[in-house]
Every structure is written in C-alpha cells, then in structure tokens.
Image (spheres, rainbow, N blue to C red):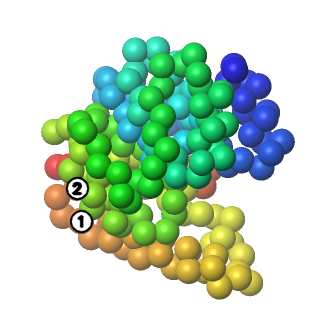
Amino acid sequence: MDVKNLKIKCLENHIPILRDKTLLALEKVIFEKNIKTMFEIGTAWGYSSLSLKNKFPNLKIVSIEKNSQNFDKALKHLKKSKIKLINDDAFLYEPKEKYDLIFFDGPKKKQKILFDKYQNYLTCNGIIFIDNIFLKKYSNNKNLEPRKQKILDDLNNFLVYLKNLKNWEIKFYDVDDGYAICQRK
C-alpha cells in the first residue's frame, strides 16, 4: 500500500499516526545524523515506518506492536516494504542488536521503564525520539476520566525524569503533540 492511501485509511479508522511536522522532524534527524538502523516501539498500522522507508530506502527498520489486530494490519500494509515487524510487548521483548535510533511511538504509560530499558540498545551516538511528549489532547482538558488523568500524570513524571538526567542532552519541541530528541552527552 502506498503511504498516502495508508494515511487516509488510518485517519478514517481513527488509528493514531505520526503528525506531519513531527514526521518532518524525524526525517531531519535521520538525514542529519546519518541514521542507518531504527527500532520503532508502536507500529499501529505501519504509517510511520512506511513513510520513513519510502524516504530512506536503505534505512533498516524494525517495529514492534503488541496489539495483534494492529500487527496483522501492519503486516498486510507493509508486506513489500522490507520492514521487520515483531508482534510482542516492548516491555518484555529483548532486541538482539543495537540501533542508531529508537522511536517511541507506542504506550504513553510507563515510558520511564521503556527509556531505561531501550537506552541499552542504542549505538554509541544513538538517539531516542519520543513522540507525543506533551499529550496536549489530555493536558488541555480539565475534566479527564481517571484512566486518562493517570496517563497524563505518568507522562508529566516522565518529563521531570528526563529533565533531571545529567548524562543526556534532551531537547523538547512544542510541535504537534510535542516530541523530544534524546542523546547521550
């Protein structure tokens, strides 16, 4: 499936996708840092991976998706793309190699756990790119249901955690729903 049609299909089915300005920022990081390998946490239907693979055909992409229905859709949409898909839980999965870029585009709860785990799978100059770092759709809502408030609280705690890391250079960008670019000093 081509990227344009996949984007339309995702939007029609309310499948969250990477927003346009954030996608451009991610593309800029891949280009400027000469990224060769990427591990994506949260495939959904594969829009982000397919967009990046089309832009960077030599980029090796591995993407993990816990939801088996989304995984099956992604398999169908990405079957000719040479993107490796894994149907597993990112909290339990153990990668077999290190990556130049790890892209957090999955669960918003417990991101500190993911960050602490996956930083060990970065190459020496590797980057962690975190999407939806501000979750504005929740933070601008004063009457959140308890489950969504818990996600927002966890995310706010994660932001404090990132800001206090001494051995990382972390830049936050208030674009779309916000993103962070994290690299060891």
| Whole-number angstrom distance, CA of label 1 to CA of label 2 | 6 Å
Whether 89 is drawn above or below 136: the answer is above
Question: Which label is found at residue 137?
Answer: none
Q: Position of residue 53 (x, y in %)?
A: 51, 22
The secondary structure type at the circle numbered 1 is loop
Q: Position of residue 43 (x, y in %)?
A: 55, 42
Whether 82 is drawn above or below 119: the answer is above
What amino acid type is highlighted by mark number 2?
Answer: Trp
Which residue is nearer to you in this view: 42 or 52? 42
Q: Residue at x 44, y 29 (%)?
A: 84
Which residue is nearer to you in this view: 131 or 108? 108
Number of marks drawn: 2
Query: In the drawing, does residue 33 fall left or right of residue 30?
Result: left
Q: Position of residue 170 (x, y in %)?
A: 32, 54
Which residue is nearer to you in this view: 43 or 185? 43
Residue 41, can we see it? yes
Classed neighbour count for the residue bearing mark 1: other residues with Cα under 10 Å, few (<14), some (14–19), many (≥20): few
Residue 182, can we see it? no
Q: Residue at x 64, y 45 (%)?
A: 70
Q: Residue at x 51, y 60 (%)?
A: 107
What amino acid type is highlighted by mark number 1?
Answer: Leu
Classed neighbour count for the residue bearing mark 2: other residues with Cα under 10 Å, few (<14), some (14–19), many (≥20): few
Instruction: Please say if the residues under marks 1 and 2 sit with CB atoms less than 8 Å apart.
Output: yes
The secondary structure type at the circle numbered 2 is strand
Which quadrant holds the N terminus?
top right
Mark 1 = which residue?
165
Q: Position of residue 146 (x, y in %)?
A: 65, 85
Query: In the drawing, does residue 124 fall left or right of residue 159?
Result: left
Mark 2 = which residue?
168
Picture quadrant of residue 174: bottom right
Query: In the drawing, does residue 31 fall left or right of residue 42?
Result: left
Q: Residue furthest right?
A: 12
